[in-house]
Structures are given as structure tokens and as C-alpha cells.
Amino acid sequence: MHDQGLAKNREHSRLHRVAYLAAVLVIVALVAGLYAYLHSPSKTEGAKEPKGPIVVCSAGSLAIPLQELAHNFEKEYGIKVLIEPSGSVEAVRKVTDFGRNCDVVAVADYRLIPMFMVPRFAKWYVAFATNSIVVAYTESSKYANEVAELRDPLNVFKILARNDVKYGFSDPNRDPCGYRSVGVIGLVALETHNLSILEDLVISKIPGSSYKIVNGTLHVYVPASIEPQGNLVVRPKEVDLVSLLESGAIDYAFEYRSVAAQHGLRYIELPGSVNLADPTQARKYSRVVVHILVGTDKEKAITMAPIVYGVTVPVNAEHSGAALLFVKYLLEHGRETFARNGQRLLQEPLGYGDVPEELRSIVRLEKS
């Protein structure tokens, strides 16, 4: 009986150890599973969210090259990208004023990001591309043959001032191409010592607009609400004018060179002294300042400068990890796509602010 009791005790002890080990293994498995879940790719700092779709709130002039890049990006990474074009000021205000989800903001004037978004809505931005302002037209435009034979391209402004010619630019309050168009007209007025160009093409056509010269600098003031008169047409963004040109509703439009090239339009190349494309002419460009949203608390004074585009991922982006991957893809693989669409990327992108580690090897860090 004593031996049987010992055997029973040994068996009971063995079963106790087995049960204990089983419990330990279950606990280890649960801990391992929890660790794997918490440290899975969807939970790491680099990718805090499901993979897209990424919403890119972009300048209208970026729509075509970004659509091409988005297509290639989706094929490579399986992440869908939705391009939502508008005027750049409007793109920024979607985030700052209207609470929209924009995973990426890409604008035609990089200065809009520090002006409106930093530091509350963005912590960093990259300047990455250039462009120039041209006067676009078609073979059906009034005086098209005369324009094509101009020896001095600045004489196109005399043609624009003719009463039977309709011309257009985008809304300066919504779109950088708009305030740049006004700025170019101001620069031409200074270059030719003929302020009537500005008066004829802008001031007399936009009620509430005005200008003054202070210490040699021309300041042009554009009211927040624009109701153009006469033969001037204003649309929210520069690409909206393309269909008007093609249909013959207007004869000429101030456009980015890339937009004119993408849509097969004829265009007049303006001199480097006024087209906002030449970095060496920056001091000359700064002789004109365009004030937008005049009469509101959003009023801004924008000094004319060489055209440089910018991009950022807003602080409140829903898909920040995937968005950052798309920005990196744009900077590393966008050069050929942009060149094919009549636009040039900077030789070396410029990074400002708290640039993410993933981008630091492909941008030159600058002081904000």
C-alpha cells in the first residue's frame, strides 16, 4: 500500500508539472502574440495606418505629372493615390480652414507652407520643382499670326489691351499662378516704364483693386472677392482656362509653361527679367509685391520671386507613413516624369524644418 501511495504521489506531481508547463507555454504564446501585434508594420512609427488611399491636395499645374507618378507608385507599392487638384492657396486652406484630410499637400509656391501651415499644420516642407509664366494662345486666337511674329515678346501686352481681345488668369486669392500673373504684369509695367499696362489689364478690370509705389517697389492690392469686368476672365486655377482657350471663349491666358506644353497650346516665352523663372533675377522680381485676400484677416503680401514648388505631409494626415513614402518616391523618381510634362525638378531638393529621417539623404537641409 505504501508503494502504491508513493506512485500516486509521483504521478500527481508529474501531472502538476505538465499542467504548470502548459500554463507557462500558453502565457508565453499570449505575450508573444501581443508583442507581435503591437510591433507589426501597421503599428510601427513609420506606418501608423493602413496603406492608403493617400489623398494628395495639389496645385492644378501638378495634376498631370502627379497622376502619372501615382499610377507607377500604385503598381510598385500597391497603395492607391488620389490626386485632388485645386489652386494652391485653396489646397492649403483645405487643411488649415476646412479640416479636410490631405495626406500630402503639394503647392506651386513653397512659401505658402510656412506662410499658412507651419507650425500648427506642418512641421517640415521640401522645395522641389520650378516653372515659368507664359502667355498661352491657340491658332484661333485673335491676332494669333501677329503674336507669332513678334520680335519683342513684351509687345503681346499691347495686344492683350485691345478692346476686342479676351484674356484670363487664375484667381490670385486661390492660386499662385494668379498672383504671379498679376506680378508679371506689374514687372512688365516697370520694365517698360509704362504703368498703364497694369492699369489697363488689372486695375480697371478688377473693382476694388489698386496699386502704389513705395521706395521703388510696386504694391498691387487684390480684393478678396473678384468680379472681373470687361474682357478679363478669372477662374479658380490656371488649368481651368485651358478649355476656355481651346473653345475660343478667350484668346489668351497666363499659364505655367508646363501646363501650356502638356495641353499642346501655343505660347509666348517672356524674358527672364519678368517670367519668374530665373534665380539670378530674384532681386528684380522682388520689385513687385502682390497683396491677396485684401480686406480679410487672411491678407498676405507676396513678394514676387523665382517660381519654386513645395510639398509636405500635414501633421494630421491620416496615412502619414504611406504619404511620406509617396513624397520620397516623387523626389527620387519624378524627374523624368516632370521633364516629359514640360517641368523641371530642382537639381537638389531643399528641405526646411523637421525633415523626416527618410528624406534627409535626398534633400539639402536649409534654415527655415
Image (spheres, rainbow, N blue to C red):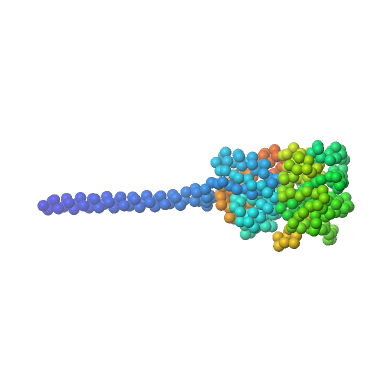
Near-viewer residue (257 or 327): 257
**Percent x, y of residue 305:** 76, 52
Depth order, front residue of 127/52: 52
Which percent across, then down, holds residue 325? 58, 46
- Residue 83 vertical position relative to residue 145 in the rendered view, above or below: below
Residue situated in front as seen by the camera: 161 or 53: 161
Q: Is residue 136 left or right of residue 162?
A: left
The residue furthest left is 1
- Could you say which quadrant of the image residue 124 lies in? bottom right
Q: How many marks?
A: 0
Residue at 63 percent of width and 55 percent of height = 95
State whether residue 366 appears in this view. Answer: no
Identify which residue is drawn at 80% across, 46% down: 167
Query: Residue at point 74% right, 57% down?
Result: 224
Q: Which one is nearer the viewer's eye here, 22 or 364?
A: 22
Residue at 79% x, 44% y is: 250
Give the image location of residue 209, x and y in percent: 80, 57
The C terminus is located in which quarter? bottom right
User: In the visual, does 25 lie left or right of 7?
Assistant: right
Residue 31 visible (yes or no)? yes
Pinpoint residue 51: horizontal percent, then vertical percent.
53, 46
Dividing the picture into quadrants, the one containing residue 225 is bottom right
